[in-house]
Amino acid sequence: MAELKRAIFTGGGTGGHLFPGLAVVEELRDRFPDFTPLFVGSERGIEKRILKEAGLRHQSLPIRSSSDLRYAPISFLKSYWQSKQLAAKTLKEFKPDVVIGLGGFASVPVVRAAQAMRIPTLLLEQNTVLGRANKWLMNRATKVCHSFEESVPTRADLNKHVVTGNPVRKEVQTLLARKMKFATLQTILILGGSQGAQPVNRMWLSVVKEMGAELDSLQIIHQTGELDCVMIREEYRQRGFSSITEPFFEVLPTLYRQADLVISRAGATTLAEIACAGIPAILIPYPHSVGDHQQKNAELFAASGAAKVVLQTSENQNSSELTAIISTLLNQPLTEMQQAMRKLAKPDAATHVVDVLVEFNPVK
């Protein structure tokens, strides 16, 4: 077997894109002890923080969001040109065996530069709908690894497009082996994504006000994002709730072990993780996701019986549907939803992705 020594992981901007990359790094390091990764992506603080915590080298590009192409086209094109030039310089200096695109527009200049230099490229697609960046990049990619069959293009070359599942870190993989609790609802974990989500927070606080004392017996674990943390902590304090409230949790797997129910956005990486943990979910899809992919992710999990879906309909959130679901779940076992969620788990996804890398043997 040829040894993979160096790889660039590119993309990110959110935990949902980065964590699958971290899972693949873990697997590569297990197989190839001398393996060295480099992450190249955006200048966003969340990306720098996650990679610093993981002890991984990160280089940022001046790339702007693809949405700026419409509102500030000159600035966008300038940032793209600068990013591609810096990407090409980095590729020449680092000499990777392969470039792995994680999604997000920051991956585009790096993958395009790699393709121009004939460096093999592999794309990870986390969602049920192909992301904008991967759509632009996949025709010239060496391989594309999909989390769901639904994102494989019609009439695609199945030698190139492979369904592997969405890679999860080893500390998440091990959750699948844990003994499930078949008790009634005791602990709720609320996640708005790696940066929180104010509409999700507002909907939940409306539930708190509507249900009042019915929730007194619950423990609340809440990832709020930076903007709402102080306000939500004070709300819980005034109501005497048992809560763990932080802007961002560095070690979610520990909290997954405590949770009986997750209230969350429907990002693919969160779904992959809670599937391994076997935690039933109430999903509130982000309504402005590209291609409405969060809605489609949520529908797939709901159809399996693992989740309930509540739509975010307006800025003045109507929480009555969320309240009704929680009231019902408070009074019934969660066994069937737990079992349905665990059936969706793909703990070996990182292994399959590295198998794909080894199979096309990018080492020159």
Image (cartoon, grey):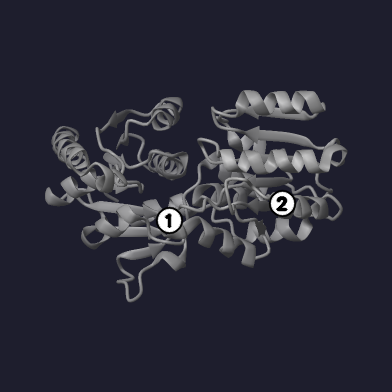
Q: Is residue 97 left or right of residue 234?
A: left
Earlier in the chain: of badge 2 and badge 1, it is 2
x and y percentages locating residue 174 in the rendered image: 60, 44
Q: Quadrant of residue 81?
A: top left
- Please name the residue that numbered disc 1 is placed on: 352
Question: Would you say 321 lies left or right of 332 here?
Answer: left
Q: Is residue 326 above or below residue 158?
A: above
Q: Give the alpha-carbon distance from disc 2 to disc 1, as whole Å.
A: 37 Å
Residue 102, position in %: x, y? 36, 47
**Res. 9 image quadrant:** top left
Relative depth, front residue between 11 and 205 = 205
Label 1 sits on a secondary structure element that is: helix
Q: Amino acid at mark 2?
A: Leu
Q: Residues within 10 Å of mark 2 (few under 14, many from 20)?
A: many
Q: Which residue is mark 2?
A: 322
For the residue marked with disc 1, what is the amino acid? Answer: His
